[in-house]
Amino acid sequence: MGEMTWCADGDRVSVRDTEYDGYAFGVRISDGSGRYRWCKDTSGADDTWKRCNVDLRENTAIEIRGSKERSGHRTIWFNTHTFSH
């Protein structure tokens, strides 16, 4: 599993892997424009946060979905959450 934070001011996302399981943890962010932004932590469960700046459209709903990835393949998807932006 992992954790993520999102700061609307500046469109910053941070993710952190929390398990020593051989998978990277990341999130996919969408603002409905047809483009996806990705942020993932490939350093393993070492308390390091990966910070990403994403450029999102203003006044839209933001959809964030978590995933676990191994060898470049997303194999486990987590629930999707939607926020107002």
Image (cartoon, rainbow, N blue to C red):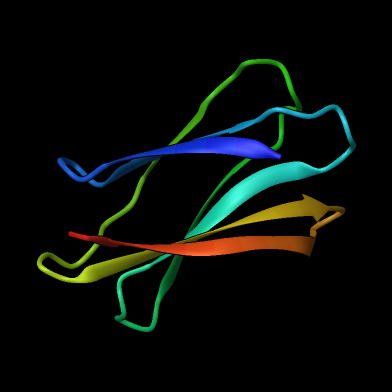
What residue sits 87% from the left and 53% below the top?
71
On the rendered structure, is 67 left or right of 76?
A: left
Asked whether, in this view, residue 6 is left or right of residue 47, the answer is left
Instruction: Relative to 22, say whether 68 is above or below.
Output: below
Q: Quadrant of residue 73?
A: bottom right
Above or below, 33 relative to 2: below
Question: Residue drawn at (67%, 56%), measured in percent from left and top?
Answer: 67
The foreground one among 80 and 58 is: 80
Where residue 42 appears, x then y in whole percent? 71, 36
Q: Looking at the image, which is closer to me, 5 or 71?
A: 5
Q: Residue furthest top?
A: 47
Taking the spot 74% from the left edge, 42% from the top edge, the residue there is 24
Determine which quarter of the picture holds residue 75: bottom right
Q: Looking at this view, name the residue that lies furthest to the bottom.
A: 34
Picture quarter with the N terminus:
top right
**Quick check: 85 left or right of 49?**
left
Q: Nearer the viewer, residue 1 or 46?
A: 1
Tell me where residue 48 appears, x and y as whole percent: 59, 19
